[in-house]
Amino acid sequence: MVIDPIADYLTRIRNAQQAGHRLVEIPSSKMKKRITEILYDKGYILKYKFDAEGSPQGVIKIALKYDSGTKTPVIKSLKRFSTPGLRQYRGAGELPRVLSGLGVAIISTSKGIMTDKEARVLGVGGEVLCEVF
């Protein structure tokens, strides 16, 4: 049983990158699907596919992205910010800036899951799920 599904999601991606895998499969949920879409839109992953077969909730298949010259992963760091034991909520003016705006913080707001930049534009705060750069 997984206590923190978002931490499990991030750990599976980190482990797959360290092992040099091209593809990683993760049990699906609505929140994980939205985080995957954000990672794809920001250019951190190559492709993704939501597969409903095999298990009741389905599987997310993610093709990881590597630098063509050095073969290093595009994602340098995936950090869980808010945890089930210590939730981290921030207002619109207090949202973290990852690497002075070069990275992305993923925020769960009342208007859905979005990046820190989108949340600032909309003027909403929320729970800071993770930071990616």
Image (tube, rainbow, N blue to C red):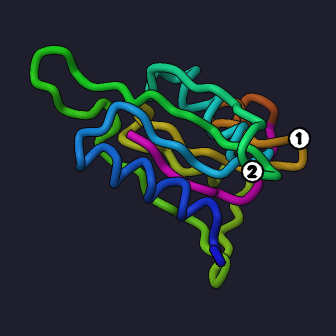
Looking at the rendering, the stretch of residues picked out in magenta corresponds to 123-133
Mark 2 Cα within 10 Å, few/some/many (few <14, many 20+)? Answer: few
Look at label 2 and name its amino acid: Ser
| Residue under the image location 75 percent in, 51 percent down | 55
* Residue position for label 2: 55
Extreme-left residue of the structure: 70
Q: Position of residue 24 (x, y in %)?
A: 46, 41
Report the residue that reaches farthest toward the front: 54
**x, y percent for residue 51:** 70, 33
Front residue of 91/86: it is 86
Which residue sits furthest top?
A: 68
Single out the residue that lies furthest toward the right. Answer: 110
Image-based side of 44 in relation to 92, left or right: left
Question: In the rendered view, would you say 76 is above or below 2?
Answer: above
Q: Callout 1: 10 Å neighbours few (<14), some, many (20+)?
A: few
Number of the label disc, if any, that sits on residue 131: none
For mark 2, give the secondary structure. Answer: loop
The image position of residue 60, as x and y in percent, is: 63, 38
Answer with the quarter of the image where residue 130 lies: bottom right
Q: The N terminus is located in which quarter?
A: bottom right
From mark 1 to mark 2, how far is it between C-alphas?
Answer: 29 Å
Give the position of the C terminus as an image quadrant. top left
In the image, which disc is placed on residue 111?
Answer: 1
Q: Observer-nearest residue: 105 or 1?
A: 1
Give the side of residue 69 with respect to residue 129, left or right. Answer: left
**Taken as a whole, is the magenta stretch helix, strand or loop?**
strand
In the image, what residue occupies the spot 67% across and 77% down? Answer: 84
Q: Of residues 117 and 56, which is closer to you in this image? A: 56
Earlier along the polypeptide chain: callout 1 or callout 2?
A: 2
- Amino acid type indicated by mark 1: Lys
The stretch drawn in magenta includes residue 116: no
